Amino acid sequence: MTTQRYEGKKMKLTVVMLLGVAALTSAIEYQRYKVVSVRPRTHEEVMIVEGLVNRWELDQWSSLKALGTPMDIMVSPRLTQRFLGVLRRRHIPFTIKINDVQALINTESAQYKTSQSMPHKFDHADYHRTDEIYSILKGAETDFPDLVTIYTAATTYEGRDIRVAKVSTGGSKPVIWIDCGIHAREWIAHATCQYILDQLTSGSNSDSEVSALLDSYDFHIMPVVNPDGYEYTWTSDRLWRKNRVPNTICHGVDCNRNFDSDFGGIGTSDNPCSDLYHGKSAFSEKESQVVRDSIKDLGVKMFVTIHSYSQLWMTPYGYTNDKPANYDEQYRVAGEAVVALEAVHGTRYQYGNIADVIYMAAGGSIDWAYDSAGVEYAFGLELRDTGSYGFLLPKEQIIPTGEETWAGIKAAVQAI
Ligand code: 0X9
Ligand code: ZN
């Protein structure tokens, strides 16, 4: 399990050009940090690797799904030789997936747009800042006034809006809830929510599949659950995961450990410096409160929360190995979804309950949605890829990722 971060991270004063505005920012840099993909084959090897992750407070980018499958771990230059030395001595197989994390971040940031004008139309050629996303949502409301309503569901600690796009042809239908970006660094998630909203609106009149979905359901889409964290990934630390509330020491709560689903249980941390810090109490954070409060009276039939990466379609539970009462039904629908998803670009997803396909973790939103909000179908998605780029997925993959994810979600909704 990931614990603390920021061992030996270099702070650097950088003049950052964002949206054409020069800002003096202290950015965290990842020069010569590597992402090592380790494949422990026995429980003993898993213990060795997890021991190193905990001792050196390494950032675990992805987790072991089964013995012999990869877990991706980011290692600083200071620790690389020692880390690889242990793996070699213990004959634990590994490959280096990313040789210089900062080089990938630089490639990505070199492509940032410098235009100062706010976009009003969907633009899946780029990742976008929160303000731009909200401007695009507003544009969708202007273009589809009878279909789209934008509402502000809450305001964050740093004062940013958390907005939702409601897509409805009228009346009050069962709701499909889709949220993205509860984890700040998972940029493809935010982009995919925008892609889905684009498909729902542009297809509302012209695409019979979409109009059939809209005849039966309202959609509520929250593209930036954690805007404070997301903005911080643009200005200061591309790999920030949590929100930005100040704790006594260190910033941020892992909002996906802050729901009231066995709060504080397995796979969470009470250390405020940890990436898995669960916060002071269940629902202490605006970002988890807003999801709770938004869905509670909506009549949500299907809840989808979008993350990256690892290509997984997850169903409850994460806090226990037990399966929910309707597990077979949720599993069936997840199966339909991944078949449809794979048919688009051949991207393979694994699916099933969180505890089986990823790792146990308490306090997550889908468990709460299923247990406490009465949602029958609660899915957590981990989008592309499987670690070649990880959180730094090139923008060229926004559209293909959107296409396949939308196919999966459509198939899931059609299957219920
Ligand atoms: O650990 C998480 O919160 C998710 N993985 S991620 O790499 N995007 O951080 C998985 C969430 C699974 N859901 C629960 N554990 N409840
Ligand atoms: Zn995540």
Image: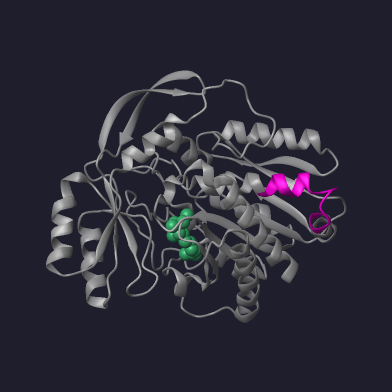
User: What span is colored magenta in the figure?
Assistant: 196-210
- Predominant secondary structure, magenta span: helix
Residue 357 in view in this figure = yes
In-image side of 10 versus 214 (left or right)? left
Q: Nearer the viewer, residue 312 or 96?
A: 96
In-image side of 413 versus 115 (left or right)? right
Query: What residue sits 36% from the left and 52% below the top?
Result: 275
Query: What residue sits 67% from the left and 67% below the top?
Result: 375
Of the 4 image quadrants, the one containing the N terminus is bottom left
Up-down: is 48 above or below 25? below
Q: Position of residue 332 (x, y in %)?
A: 64, 77
Q: Position of residue 416 (x, y in %)?
A: 73, 71
Magenta region includes residue 209: yes
Q: Position of residue 154 (x, y in %)?
A: 62, 42
Residue 325 in view in this figure = no
Number of numbered tags placed on the structure image: 0
